[in-house]
Image: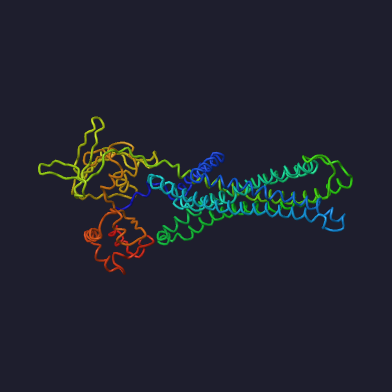
């Protein structure tokens, strides 16, 4: 039956995009909730690996921080006494001890970094694998209405761009941020151990750096999220144009299509350029603030030594030494780099959270409901007309009615009688496509529906298959209300060939077998002969083993319909 009721569906342009984007924004409504759910999602599959990663990150952070301790000890316990003694001989043992300890700590840090990097690769890619599995499994259970109201390219963007943003979040941004925070805590403790006065100076400068990160990184995050949404819109438009390229060329719509694309592409350009402008400026700002702090600590430290100011720290009271200033300068340099690295991840974390929200929004979509309990079974019909169920394929079919009241089962032979009684239906709940329609189709009858575009011809086939639920009335199949028939069994009993044929990548034999996976090659060939398709199939380069791709583009429209 030809698809002629296109006007009854949402237009594939603005309305579809708006519905899609509204749903996508809804998935990012609560960043905290999304973060908690993402963490639980990861822990559900990789709990012990994440625990090992956390331990390794802590050790690696501490190992990178204690370098300042060794620097202070080298200056105060080796270089200064060595200069006073006129050589390193008196302090050679101390130098060897410090170097050995440094080697052990650094080696431990390298090992832990290697271990958690390898484990995070498994956790990241494994999480994405589970996400794609969950999305695809849920997509197979969604009603047709979902695909009519969401641009296909936008859905594809969830599988590609959004999962890639989640990969960046789990594999790089989150570990970097956690390690940076641990490093900052360890470094603050080390600074307080050495000098309270210099720590106060560093903390004040750190507050300025954090404020700058919030202002610049926050703007970058907003535009990163906007960039993801604009990218999904552009991909949805491109997918739509590719799918309808013949229509575009037949109606000479190329210039209008280019104009529409330029508008969407310009919006993507603006969101991307703003996001990257803020993101790119953040690194230099952090670097320059770190350099200013470095100079400030060197100047203030020199004044503390010159004025012999009493030093206060967890190590006790005393004077500020050259070793303390040198270690402080090393920590300040590491501090600015750590804050800069964390700041660079702010935008990617926001983008990753937005991507995770859209992934979970797809996973959470309401699946197609099926309250049907009448099933289709193989049957045997006795001489006196009694219908019984068979465990073997008999080419006879019956509807199996389990009665809930007394537990008994009755059978109705499959005949193929369709009756629609006062059926009304609307796609959007407002504009009725069908109003009080009644019709019947007896077994063996051939019926044609003729009407203007949008009259509801294809809608009738969609309702018989329960791709949509009717607003009012009843549809009976062999006297059974189709709402009582399990959807899988209902659709298994029907054969529908639409004007828009869909062939899948695979051999001709695979496509014929699509409706019944256990069919033998001989049965597939027999079906092709019944459809008058055997002749042209055998003329293909490899006959039934010819591989079809791109929706069977190598076949004519008529051949594709026969094959379907």
Rendering coords of residue 431 (x, y %): 38, 40
Q: Nearer the viewer, residue 265 or 156?
A: 156
| 414 left or right, relative to 299 | left
Q: Nearer the viewer, residue 139 or 345?
A: 345
Of all residues, the one furthest to the left in this rendering is 384
Of all residues, the one furthest to the top in this rendering is 405
Q: Nearer the viewer, residue 513 or 104?
A: 104
Rendering coords of residue 447 (x, y %): 22, 49
| 46 left or right, relative to 284 | left
Q: How many numbered marks, from 0 up?
A: 0
Image quadrant containing the C terminus: bottom left
Q: Residue at x 46, y 45 (%)?
A: 362
Q: Is residue 124 visible in the rendered structure shown here?
A: yes
Q: Nearer the viewer, residue 392 or 505?
A: 392
Q: Residue at x 86, y 47 (%)?
A: 305
**By what rule are the colours in the image chosen?**
rainbow
Rendering coords of residue 283 (x, y %): 68, 53
Of all residues, the one furthest to the right in this rendering is 307
Q: Is residue 289 visible in the rendered structure shown here?
A: no
Q: Quadrant of residue 430?
A: top left
Rendering coords of residue 117 (x, y %): 58, 53
């Amino acid at each position: 039956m030809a698809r002629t009721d296109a006007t009854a569906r949402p237009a594939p342009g603005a309305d579809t995009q708006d519905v899609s984007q509204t749903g996508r924004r809804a998935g990012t409504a609560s960043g905290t909730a999304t973060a908690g759910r993402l963490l639980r999602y990861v822990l559900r599959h990789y709990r012990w690996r994440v625990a090992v990663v956390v331990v390794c990150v802590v050790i690696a952070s501490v190992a990178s921080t204690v370098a300042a301790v060794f620097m202070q000890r080298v200056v105060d316990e080796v270089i200064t006494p060595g200069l006073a003694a006129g050589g390193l001989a008196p302090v050679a043992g101390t130098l060897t001890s410090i170097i050995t300890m440094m080697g052990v700590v650094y080696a431990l840090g390298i090992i832990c970094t290697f271990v958690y990097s390898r484990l995070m690769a498994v956790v990241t890619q494994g999480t994405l694998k589970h996400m794609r599995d969950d999305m695809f499994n849920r997509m197979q259970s969604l009603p047709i209405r979902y695909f009519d109201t969401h641009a296909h390219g936008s859905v594809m963007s969830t599988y590609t761009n959004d999962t890639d943003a989640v990969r960046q979040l789990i594999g790089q941004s989150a570990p970097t941020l956690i390690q940076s925070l641990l490093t900052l805590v360890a470094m603050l403790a080390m600074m307080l151990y050495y000098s309270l006065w210099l720590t106060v100076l560093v903390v004040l400068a750190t507050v300025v750096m954090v404020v700058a990160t919030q202002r610049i990184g926050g703007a970058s995050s907003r535009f990163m999220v906007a960039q993801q949404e604009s990218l999904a819109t552009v991909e949805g438009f491109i997918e739509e144009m590719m799918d309808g390229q013949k229509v575009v060329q037949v109606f000479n719509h190329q210039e209008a299509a280019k104009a529409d694309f330029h508008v969407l592409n310009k919006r993507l350009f603006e969101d991307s350029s703003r996001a990257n402008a803020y993101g790119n400026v953040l690194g230099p700002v952090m670097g320059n603030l770190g350099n200013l702090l470095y100079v400030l600590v060197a100047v203030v430290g020199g004044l503390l030594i010159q004025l012999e100011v009493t030093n206060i720290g967890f190590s006790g009271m005393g004077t500020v030494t050259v070793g303390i200033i040198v270690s402080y300068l090393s920590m300040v340099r590491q501090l600015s780099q750590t804050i800069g690295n964390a700041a660079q991840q702010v935008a990617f974390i926001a983008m990753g959270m937005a991507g995770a929200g859209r992934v979970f929004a797809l996973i959470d979509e309401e699946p197609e409901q099926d309250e049907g309990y009448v099933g289709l079974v193989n049957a045997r019909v006795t001489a006196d007309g009694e219908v019984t169920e068979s465990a073997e394929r008999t080419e006879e079919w019956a509807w199996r009615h389990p009665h809930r009241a007394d537990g008994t089962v009755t059978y109705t032979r499959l005949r193929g009688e369709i009756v629609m009684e006062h059926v009304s239906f609307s796609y959007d709940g407002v504009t009725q496509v069908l109003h009080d329609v009644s019709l019947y189709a007896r077994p063996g009858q051939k019926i044609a529906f003729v009407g203007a575009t949008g009259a509801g011809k294809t809608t009738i086939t969609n309702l018989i298959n329960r791709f949509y639920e009717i607003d009012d009335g009843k549809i009976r199949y062999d006297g059974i209300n189709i709402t009582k028939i399990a959807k899988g069994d209902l659709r298994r009993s029907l054969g529908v060939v639409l004007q828009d044929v869909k062939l899948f990548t695979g051999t001709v034999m695979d496509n014929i077998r699509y409706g019944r996976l256990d069919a033998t090659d001989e049965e597939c060939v027999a079906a092709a002969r019944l459809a008058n398709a055997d002749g042209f199939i055998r003329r293909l380069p490899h006959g039934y083993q010819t591989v079809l791709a791109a929706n069977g583009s190598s076949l004519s429209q008529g051949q594709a319909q026969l094959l379907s």
